Image: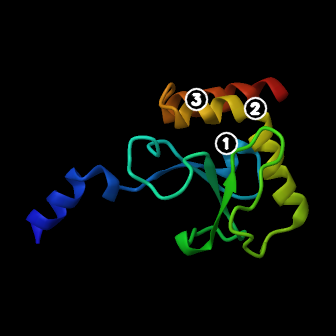
Amino acid sequence: MYSEIKKNLEEPSLLVEMANLDKELTGLKVNLWIDSSGQKRDIKHSPYRIKMQNNYRRLIDSNDMIPISIDKENPENIDKIKLKIKTKDYNEVKQFIKDNYEDLCLLIQNKITDRELIHRLEDKLNKKK
């Protein structure tokens, strides 16, 4: 059992793929996850996507996330999954992606780390206050 767990931990593609951008950090009503290792792994989808929590629950269910394209002009619900959040809150997520497009791309391209992205977002939030 232990050897199987150890083997899985040593295989990067089996590790959790997303870095949590919680709603307290982003100022949004839902949590987001961005894939910061997509270009390093053999994935079947575009690495330029973010996952959005599709509910308002405190506990997050990985089966209830929507992939949203990271696009400067028109982020969209890639799989056309029915929204369980208000349209206003979804539009705020899309605006967040547009506003932070360059930094999100830098993370995906491995030019900045998850931590650097979080610091940049915190700096932007502090400037708004």
63 up-or-down from 20: above or below: below
10 Å crowding of disc 3: few (<14), some (14-19), many (20+) = some
Neighbor class of circle 2 (other Cα within 10 Å; few <14, some 14-19, many 20+) is few
Q: Position of residue 26 (x, y in %)?
A: 71, 43
Mark 3 element type: helix
Q: Which mark is residue 15?
A: none
On the image, the x and y values in percent for residue 97 come to: 75, 43
First-in-chain label (2 vs 3): 3
In the rendered image of this protein, does residue 91 appear above or below residue 110? below
Nearest to viewer (mark 2 / mark 3) = 3
Q: Earlier in the sequence, mark 2 or mark 1?
A: 1
Q: Is residue 45 left or right of residue 2?
A: right
- The amino acid on which the numbered mark 1 sits, given as a three-letter code, is Leu
Q: Nearer the viewer, residue 34 or 59?
A: 34
Q: Position of residue 63 (x, y in %)?
A: 56, 74
* Image quadrant in which you'd find residue 86: bottom right
Quadrant for the N terminus, please. Answer: bottom left
Report crowding for label 1: few under 14, some 14 to 19, many 20 or more residues within 10 A (C-alpha).
Answer: some
As helix, strand or loop, the secondary structure at mark 2 comes to: helix
Mark 3, residue position: 106
> Where residue 72 sits: x, y (%)?
78, 38
- Give the alpha-carbon distance from disc 2 to disc 3, as whole Å: 19 Å
Identify the mark at residue 25; answer none if there is no mark.
1
Q: Is residue 129 visible?
A: no
Which residue in the protein does label 2 denote?
125
Mark 1: secondary structure: helix
Q: Residue at x 40, y 56 (%)?
A: 16
Q: Do tag 2 and tag 1 residues touch (Cβ < 8 Å)?
A: yes
Instruction: Give the spatial CA distance, label 3 vs label 1.
Output: 18 Å
| Residue 110, above or below 51 | above
Q: Quadrant of the C terminus?
A: top right
Q: Is residue 73 left or right of residue 4?
A: right
